[in-house]
Amino acid sequence: MSLNPAMKRYNRRMIWLWLIYAAFLFVALYTFTHRLLGGPGTYLVAILPALPIIGVFVAVGRYLFEEQDEYLRMLMVRQTLWASGFALSLATIWGFLERFDLVDHIDAYYIAIVWFFGLGVGAVMNKLTLGASVQC
Amino acid sequence: MLMENRLRVLRAERGWSQQDLAGRLEVSRQSVNAIETGKYDPSLPLAFRIAELFERPIEEIFVAPSLRSSKAI
């Protein structure tokens, strides 16, 4: 299947964002491991890896705005709804389990990873219910 | 309730593949397939584009669910 212009832009943005994420994560880990910074600068470095992840959310939103094919747009909307429902449900369940000391603490940024996994769940659900999924 | 439509018949009359029709409508082949198989109802603008392409009124291509049920009665 050939990719339309919106899909190509989405893919290009994703590649750049994940490359930037890897670089920023390396910088943050290196900085904190070697205690290179102190003061307010540490906050800035600590959130560096979060910025490209936020960029991924923006890229998904931009794809939805730029996709001219209404059916493909609908498929992606369904995928993001599945991802959001999946991630929020899991976070809520885990939160209560953690509150009652039944499971270990998990860092909050893992919710983004669960959301990305949820996009995959959404694609599978689209395939099962509609026989199609967005293939970016 | 999704609409029924005669898209597959009209396309076949012209000897077009789903890809041909998708190209003429500037949508993906997946969209054409989803509409033909009744899994997706097109928006009003897309329905008008389809009607213009086949030079037919919309109601000759898409059948409203209410009309379908009244026929059944």
Image: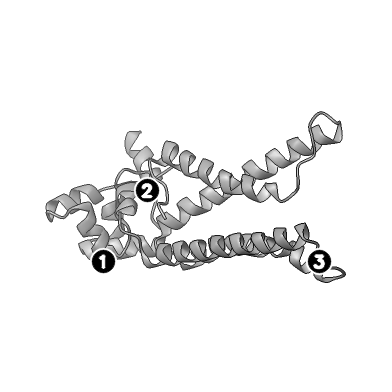
Image quarter of residue A2:
bottom left
| Residue hosting label 3 | A42
Q: Is residue B36 left or right of residue A67?
A: left
Q: Chain of mark 3?
A: A
- As shown in the figure, which amino acid type bears the numbered disc 2? Ala
Whether pointer 1 and pointer 2 mark residues with C-beta atoms closer than 8 Å, the reply is no
Residue at 68% from the left image edge and 47% from the top image edge = A111
Which residue position holds label 1? B52
Q: Quadrant of the C terminus of chain A?
A: bottom left
Q: Residues within 10 Å of mark 1 (few under 14, many from 20)?
A: few
Left or right: residue A128 versus residue A112 is left
Q: Residue at x 85, y 68 (%)?
A: A38
Residue holding disc 2 = B64
Residue type of the residue flagged with mark 3: Thr
Q: CA distance from mark 1 to mark 2?
A: 18 Å
Instruction: Find numbered disc 1 in the image and state the secondary structure of the residue it sits on.
Output: helix
Instruction: Name the residue nearer the viewer: A89 or B72.
Output: A89
Percent position of residue A87, x then y: 65, 44
Which marked residue is nearer to the observer: mark 1 or mark 2? 1
Q: Residue at x 71, y 58 (%)?
A: A29
Furthest toward the top, the residue is: A102
